[in-house]
Image (cartoon, coloured by chain):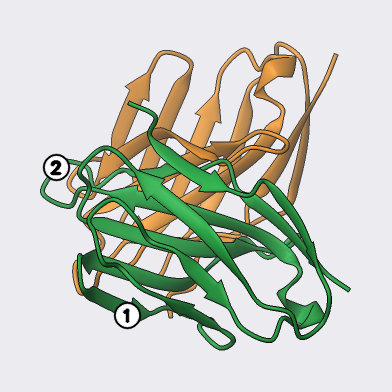
Chain colours: A green, B orange
Amino acid sequence: NAGVTQTPKFRILKIGQSMTLQCAQDMNHNYMYWYRQDPGMGLKLIYYSVGAGITDKGEVPNGYNVSRSTTEDFPLRLELAAPSQTSVYFCASSYLAASSYEQYFGPGTRLTVT
Amino acid sequence: GEDVEQSLFLSVREGDSSVINCTYTDSSSTYLYWYKQEPGAGLQLLTYIFSNMDMKQDQRLTVLLNKKDKHLSLRIADTQTGDSAIYFCAEFPNTGNQFYFGTGTSLTVIP
C-alpha cells in the first residue's frame, strides 16, 4: 500500500491564481480530511468527507473547495490564492469502523502565495 | 470547536525522561491520541488510549489519562536524539466526525 499520497510537494503561486492539491489513499478508508498547519498553530481542519459524494466544512473552509467523487481521491481547490493561504497542507484518511479511528497522514504540500 | 492545549517547547538531556502534557475539553472523547511529526514530514500515530483506561504503556512510551482533570500526558523514557520532533495530542469526540489537535510541543533532545 502507498498509504496517503499528496501532490505536489511544493508550489509557489501568485496572488489570484488557482490550483488543486491532490490527495489519494489506497486503504479503502471512508473518512478523508484536509488540514493546514501554520507555525505554532497546530493543525486546522479545512474540509472533511465521510464518504464518496459527502463533504463538510471544518474550522477554516473559506477560500477552499473540495469534492469527493471516489473513495480514493479528495482534491482541495484553492480559488484566487491569497498570502494568508501560505501554509503546509496535509491530507489524512481514517476508517471509522476500525477499533481506534487512527488517522494516516500524507507527507504534506508546502504552498507559498506571493 | 474544541480547545486542546499543549505547551510549545520542551528540552531534555539525552537519557532523561520527557513528559509532554495536554489538556482537552470534550469529556465524551472515546479516543485520545499522541502523534509525532519529524521535520518536513506528516504526522505519525505514536499511541492512543481509550477513555476507559488510566494508563497505557508501549515500550518507552507511557500515556497517562486523568479524566477528571481532562489531562493527558506522554512520558518517553530514556529519551534519544531521534525523539526530537513535534508531538501533538488529539481527541476524537463521540459527538462529531472531527479530530481536534493541540498546537504541538516541540521536543529538543540535547546530546
Residue that carries the numbered disc 2 in the rendered image: A98
Q: At which x and y percent is residue A63?
A: 59, 86
Identified by mark 2, the residue type is Ala
Mark 2 or mark 1: which comes first in sequence? 1
Residue closest to the far left: A97
Can you say which quadrant of the picture contains the C terminus of chain B? top right
Quick check: can you spot residue B5? yes
Which residue is nearer to you in this view: A56 or A67?
A67
Residue that carries the numbered disc 1 in the rendered image: A56
Q: Secondary structure at mark 2?
A: loop
Q: At which x and y percent is residue A106?
A: 50, 43
In the displayed structure image, the side of residue A84 where residue B42 appears, left or right: left
- Tell me the residue at 72%/81% (across/down): A81
User: Which corner quadrant of the image does residue A20 belong to?
Assistant: bottom right
Crowd class of label 1 (few under 14; some 14 to 19; many from 20; radius 10 Å)? some
Identified by mark 1, the residue type is Asp
Q: At which x and y percent is residue B90?
A: 43, 54
- Tell me the residue at 69%/86% (across/down): A80
Q: Are marks 2 and 1 on the same chain?
A: yes
In the displayed structure image, the side of residue A106 where residue A63 appears, left or right: right
Can you say which quadrant of the picture contains the N terminus of chain B? bottom left
Task: Identify the subunit bearing mark 1.
Answer: A
Crowd class of label 2 (few under 14; some 14 to 19; many from 20; radius 10 Å)? few
